[in-house]
């Protein structure tokens, strides 16, 4: 008899999230030195963690025996000041992924609907499944969210609409006009989530915080995992209406963000030097790849984030063969894009190495 029949059936229905392949695992399998592996699979910061965060976290280790500030007062105050949103509209999470889960925990029941774009970040679908909700997938022609169609899809059962902006894995963004037109149509029983994990990479990002300040039922998600280079810490935050924030605060664990992460995130928030250096390197890398792909006649999706999608024919083959040479990219089959791989922007040396290996693999006759 299988234990599955006694478990929550929504959990049994889940397909576990497949993260980018870890460097250590790849090095072990290939018998290589981890330092020789190029991982451009998880949109991590190639410049490493914010130096200010590292320094602050080292000092914080001395207090590791004390429970964290469960209310996250210092970090939430700093976020409140920086984004000009009252502190009771700030929630912190163990990565912004935790806040995605808290939103779903708080607003989804079996029978409720969650709306997202066809090629949206896959975690939304996992969470909709976990809470037994109906996942409504709206086509995104040209890999860009179609907000008019997403507004059309809203019903009396809709509770959450997720807009990843820029979206992962497509790297595309919707602008202010489309967002304003969309927001004018959203009824009160729907919470709109703007997942802005890559916000800091964008030159002219749309303003969604105005809706938070207006008290609309929105939640804007940001993270320390991407431009701040702190993916290992698991720290992110949400800015939402008072009502939505109060619900999320009830749904979270008492000490959901650890003390070292709170201190690191606080320091990173003001590390504009690291943010600017990362953005500059990323712009250069995007340009490098877009030029290279155009020269080779490879189809790609122009990106405003720190990664891009390129069409390679058989994404699984290209992933595997690049891996054999120590370069980890991300195959896209789980996003229903089996012909594509996603490449994160690295250092100039990593970008050159990745392109060189991609060239070799594409030149070889498919096995
Ligand atoms: C990387 C990413 C996140 C951030 O995840 P964390 O849990 O904060 O590390 C959130 N949303 C999208 C679309 C992402 O790509």
Image: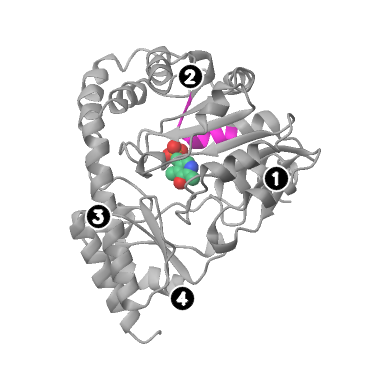
In this rendering, the answer to whether 119 lies above or below 219 is below
User: In whole angstroms, how far apart are the C-alphas of marks 3 and 1?
Assistant: 36 Å
* Residue under numbered circle 4: 314
| Mark 2 residue crowding within 10 angstroms, few (<14) / some (14–19) / many (20+) | some
- The residue at the point 56 percent across, 43 percent down is 177
Query: Which quadrant of the structure image shows residue 290?
Result: bottom left
Looking at the image, is mark 1 or mark 4 earlier in the sequence?
1
Q: Secondary structure at mark 2?
A: loop
Residue 151 has which mark? 1
Which labelled disc corresponds to residue 85? 2
CA separation, marks 1 and 2?
26 Å
Number of numbered discs visible in the structure rendering: 4
**Which residues lie in the magenta part?**
92-101
- In front: label 4 or label 2: 2
Give percent across and percent down for residue 152.
Answer: 74, 48
Quarter of the image with the C terminus is: bottom left
Upstream in sequence: badge 4 or badge 3: 3
Q: Are marks 2 and 3 in contact (CB under 8 Å)?
A: no
Q: For mark 3, what is the residue?
A: 284
| Disc 4 from disc 2: Cα separation | 46 Å
């Amino acid at each position: 008899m299988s234990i599955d029949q006694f478990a929550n059936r929504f959990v049994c229905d889940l397909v576990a999230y497949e993260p980018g392949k870890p460097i250590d695992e790849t090095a072990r399998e290939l018998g290589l030195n981890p330092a020789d592996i190029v991982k451009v699979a998880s949109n991590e910061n190639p410049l490493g963690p914010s130096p200010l965060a590292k320094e602050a976290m080292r000092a914080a280790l001395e207090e590791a025996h004390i429970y964290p500030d469960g209310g996250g007062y210092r970090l939430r105050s700093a976020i409140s000041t920086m984004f000009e949103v009252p502190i009771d509209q700030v929630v912190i999470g163990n990565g912004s992924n935790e806040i995605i889960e808290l939103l779903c925990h708080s607003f989804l029941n079996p029978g409720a609907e969650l709306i997202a774009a066809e090629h949206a970040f896959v975690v939304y679908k996992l969470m909709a499944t976990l809470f037994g909700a109906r996942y409504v997938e709206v086509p995104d022609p040209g890999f860009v969210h179609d907000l008019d169609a997403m507004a059309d899809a809203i019903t009396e059962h809709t509770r959450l609409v997720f807009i990843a902006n820029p979206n992962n894995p497509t790297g595309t963004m919707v602008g202010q006009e489309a967002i304003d037109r969309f927001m004018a149509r959203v009824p009160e029983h729907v919470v709109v989530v703007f997942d802005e994990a890559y916000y800091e990479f964008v030159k002219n990002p749309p303003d969604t915080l105005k809706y938070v300040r207006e008290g609309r039922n929105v939640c804007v998600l940001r993270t320390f995992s991407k431009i701040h280079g702190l993916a290992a810490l698991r720290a992110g935050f949400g800015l939402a209406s008072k009502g939505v924030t109060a619900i999320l605060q009830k749904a979270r664990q008492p000490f959901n963000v650890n003390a070292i992460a709170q201190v690191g995130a606080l320091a990173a928030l003001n590390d504009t030097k690291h943010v600017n250096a990362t953005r500059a390197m990323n712009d250069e890398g995007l340009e490098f790849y877009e030029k290279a792909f155009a020269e080779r006649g490879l189809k790609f999706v122009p990106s405003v984030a720190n990664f891009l999608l390129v069409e390679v024919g058989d994404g699984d083959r290209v992933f595997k063969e690049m891996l054999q040479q120590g370069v980890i990219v991300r195959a896209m089959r789980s996003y229903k894009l089996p012909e594509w791989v996603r490449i994160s922007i690295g250092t100039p040396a990593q970008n050159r190495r990745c392109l060189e290996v991609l060239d070799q693999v594409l030149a070889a006759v498919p096995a």
